[in-house]
């Protein structure tokens, strides 16, 4: 089965692993992403330089934003970025096409640099400046945008990293010189420049490799959930007793008498807006525990390889042994049902259930089920898109061949608290919004799998 970089470009997994690159799937994005803190905290000079280059660009944006209003055209030129979908990493399970960074991100970034973080680039509490600072308390800049922005700003490095490997290990027939836009920023002309690179090519599009040691999963090391969870401990690390007292007093003053967790988060955000120093002390704590970030990254990458490459790849191979699985029936309704039924049979009767456990624990995440299901559609002419929002919310999968042949598939875990409500209403709403006649609900019990149409 040709699912992964090593399969398609005829490269040994050992060679790829020795080079330090992750063996990506070229069917669907895998939920890993580049964490800028891993660049900052690395002992490698080349990674440290990449982080310095990111901060240099942000300082450039900050200088422009504080000098006066930035026109919409310049915001678009400097802050709009397409997702670097060629690395096949991130949060999009439908192929590798994500949203990218548009006007909302550009304005949020510009506003945060101008109004909230006026000391960005010249912090006194932390060892360095951090892009993630911009996503801790205000909406508009989240972990996915941080990752997309980071990947765009180090794209030249990733292109050269991949080119070096490809010239040594990928056959000439499988690579090509490709013109790539927005590779490096020219500070004299204040514009992005293009470049040409010799790269692996799959379906007429180039592919990028990423070093394993700068990848993580779920959250960046400096992240909003940790900021809220640890907020009550942050003031205790502030040496200035007057400032510490002011922060504690303000935080208590904006809390209701019987606060919920949501109330505490709102109070923490309000306090950080009033006293931005709190954010710097949180980041300082994260810097001091940077070794833990590297350990987490290593575990995340190892686990992801075992689950998404080794185990899921093995399950797809089991499916391929059923010759009818990859045949193309008359329409998407028949094909979707057949694939679900085969998947059910292999899981329940052919030992496939073993591949849903890792380190003795079930892989009980709907996102992981989505990745597996998408991998099973690699050999189909149908368009398989995930989380298509046609006006009434996102459906897990829409499988289509033209406008008149559409089938929806919705996955749920038996332990999902909203299972009953979803079974009653959700799929019917999606079918109406997508103009699809048929749809299937698939429930994973981790003991059996049931299909409802």
Image (tube, rainbow, N blue to C red):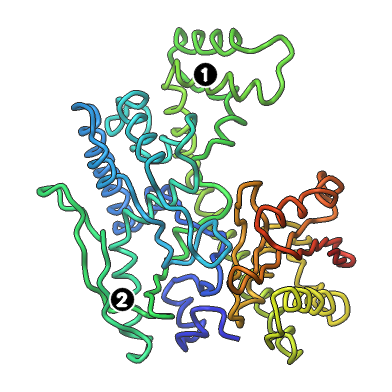
Query: Quick one: 366 or 74, which is closer to the camera?
Result: 74
Q: Give above or below for 30 relative to 12.
A: above
Which mark, residue 135? Answer: none
Q: Is residue 425 left or right of residue 184?
A: right
Q: Please state the horizontal and vertical placement of residue 146, each as a whole percent of the image.
A: 43, 46
Measured in 3D between alpha carbons, the distance from the residue under mark 2 to the one under mark 1, in whole angstroms, is 47 Å
Q: Give above or below for 327 relative to 433.
A: below
Q: Give above or below for 107 relative to 211.
A: above
Q: Please state the horizontal and vertical placement of residue 19, each as a whole percent of the image.
A: 41, 75
Q: Residues within 10 Å of mark 2 (few under 14, many from 20)?
A: many
Q: Is residue 309 left or right of residue 322?
A: left
Q: Give above or below for 145 relative to 115.
A: below
Q: Secondary structure at mark 2?
A: helix
Query: What residue is pinned by disc 2?
Result: 163
Q: Is residue 298 left or right of residue 413?
A: left
Q: Residue furthest front?
A: 404
Location of residue 410 by image quarter? bottom right
Ranked by sequence position, the earlier of labels 2 and 1 is: 2
Query: Quick one: 22 or 419, which is closer to the camera?
Result: 419
Task: Name which residue lies at 89% across and 67% down.
Answer: 448
Q: In which quadrant is the N terminus drawn?
A: bottom right
Query: What residue is pinned by disc 1?
Result: 270
Task: Name which residue lies at 86% across and 61% down.
Answer: 445
């Amino acid at each position: 089965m040709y699912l992964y970089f090593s399969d398609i470009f005829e490269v040994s997994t050992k060679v790829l692993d020795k080079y330090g690159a992750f063996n990506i799937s070229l069917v669907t994005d895998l939920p890993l992403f580049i964490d800028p803190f891993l660049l900052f905290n690395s002992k490698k000079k080349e990674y440290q330089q990449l982080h310095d280059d990111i901060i240099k660009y942000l300082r450039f944006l900050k200088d422009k934003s504080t000098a006066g209003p930035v026109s919409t055209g310049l915001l678009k030129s400097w802050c709009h970025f397409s997702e670097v979908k060629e690395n096949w990493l991130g949060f999009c399970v439908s192929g590798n096409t994500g949203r990218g960074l548009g006007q909302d991100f550009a304005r949020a970034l510009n506003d945060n640099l101008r109004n909230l973080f006026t000391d960005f680039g010249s912090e006194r509490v932390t060892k360095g400046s951090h892009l993630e600072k911009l996503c801790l308390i205000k909406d508009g800049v989240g972990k996915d945008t941080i990752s997309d922005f980071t990947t765009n700003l180090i794209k030249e490095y990733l292109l050269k990293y991949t080119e070096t490997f490809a010239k040594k290990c990928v056959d000439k027939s499988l690579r090509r010189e490709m013109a790539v836009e927005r590779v490096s920023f020219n500070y004299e002309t204040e514009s992005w420049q293009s470049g040409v690179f010799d790269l692996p090519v799959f379906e007429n599009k180039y592919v990028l490799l990423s070093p394993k040691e700068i990848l993580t999963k779920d959250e960046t090391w400096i992240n909003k959930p940790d900021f809220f969870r640890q907020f009550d401990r942050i003031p205790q690390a502030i040496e200035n007793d007057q400032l510490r007292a002011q922060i504690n007093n303000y935080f208590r003053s904006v809390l209701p008498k019987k606060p919920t967790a949501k109330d505490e988060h709102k109070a923490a955000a309000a306090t950080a807006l009033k006293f931005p120093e709190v954010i710097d002390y949180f980041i300082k704590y994260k810097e001091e525990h940077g070794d833990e970030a590297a350990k987490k990254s290593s575990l995340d990458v190892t686990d992801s390889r075992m689950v998404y490459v080794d185990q899921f790849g093995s399950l797809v191979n089991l499916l391929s042994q059923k010759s009818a699985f990859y045949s193309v029936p008359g329409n998407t309704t028949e094909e979707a049902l057949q694939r679900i039924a085969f998947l059910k049979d292999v899981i329940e009767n052919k030992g496939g259930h073993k591949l849903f456990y890792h380190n003795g624990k079930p892989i009980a995440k709907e996102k992981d089920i989505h990745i597996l299901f998408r991998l099973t559609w690699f050999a189909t002419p149908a368009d398989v898109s995930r989380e298509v929002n046609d006006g009434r919310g996102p459906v897990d999968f829409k499988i289509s061949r033209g406008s008149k042949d559409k089938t929806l598939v919705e996955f749920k875990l038996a332990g999902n608290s909203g299972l009953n409500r979803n079974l009653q209403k959700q799929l019917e709403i999606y079918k109406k919004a997508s103009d699809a006649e048929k749809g299937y609900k698939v429930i994973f019990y981790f003991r059996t799998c049931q299909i409802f149409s």
